[in-house]
Image (tube, rainbow, N blue to C red):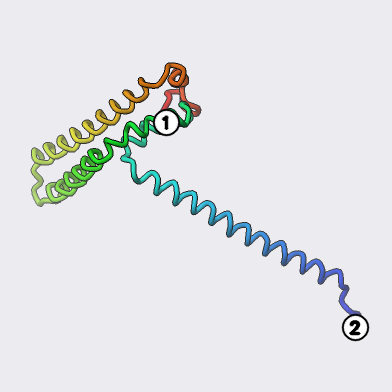
Amino acid sequence: MAPKPERKRGRNWLAGVAVVSLAVNAYFLGALFTETLRFRTSRDESSPHAAKMELRWLRGRLSPDAVRSVEAALEPLKPDMMARIQRLKTLRAELGPLVAAPEPDRAAIDAHLREIRLEVGAMQEQTQSKVFDAVLALPQAERAPLATPAQGSAKGN
């Protein structure tokens, strides 16, 4: 029998190194992606949805410093907004038994839904007022980009 050529062993070794390299790169990319998501999630959990929605509309259109000043203006509202969110959770929890009752009381359900809408509306009004007070306090040159619709949206978000 003829001996196997050395050339093939070299190719196998090279293929093994390539596979290990790809696996290590995939591991580090996965770790980086996971850490980015964890950072993003932990940062966003501190802001109620109404505030995040308003800030998302401003990001990329105002300078980072201007967005930070708007975020700072919202900071005093956070305890009240978190209390409103807790109230909304309570209202939703109370709504469940009303809906699940053998004979649901539509008037009671509608009254509960009305309370939920009022609470959501109050939180949105409070947030928007504070955001736009802060935006209007910025110099006109800082606010000028808001006249142009946001990228990717004809309506400006």
Q: Residue at x 42, y 23 (%)?
A: 155
Quadrant the C terminus occupies: top left
Badge 1 marks a residue whose secondary structure is: helix
Q: Residues within 10 Å of mark 1 (few under 14, many from 20)?
A: many
Indicate left or right for 68 with 123 as reference: right
Indicate left or right for 72 with 4 as reference: left
For disc 1, the marked residue is: 67
| Badge number at residue 32 | none
Of residues 136 and 112, the one nearer the viewer is 136
Specify the amino acid type for callout 2.
Met
Could you say which quadrant of the image residue 140 lies in?
Answer: top left
Badge 2 marks a residue whose secondary structure is: loop
Q: Residue furthest top?
A: 140
For disc 2, the marked residue is: 1
**In whole angstroms, how far apart are the C-alphas of marks 2 and 1?**
76 Å
Q: Residues within 10 Å of mark 2 (few under 14, many from 20)?
A: few
Residue 58 picture location, percent across and down: 42, 28
Of residues 111 and 78, the one nearer the viewer is 78
Of residues 110 and 34, the one nearer the viewer is 34
Residue 31 picture location, percent across and down: 53, 56
Specify the amino acid type for callout 1.
Val
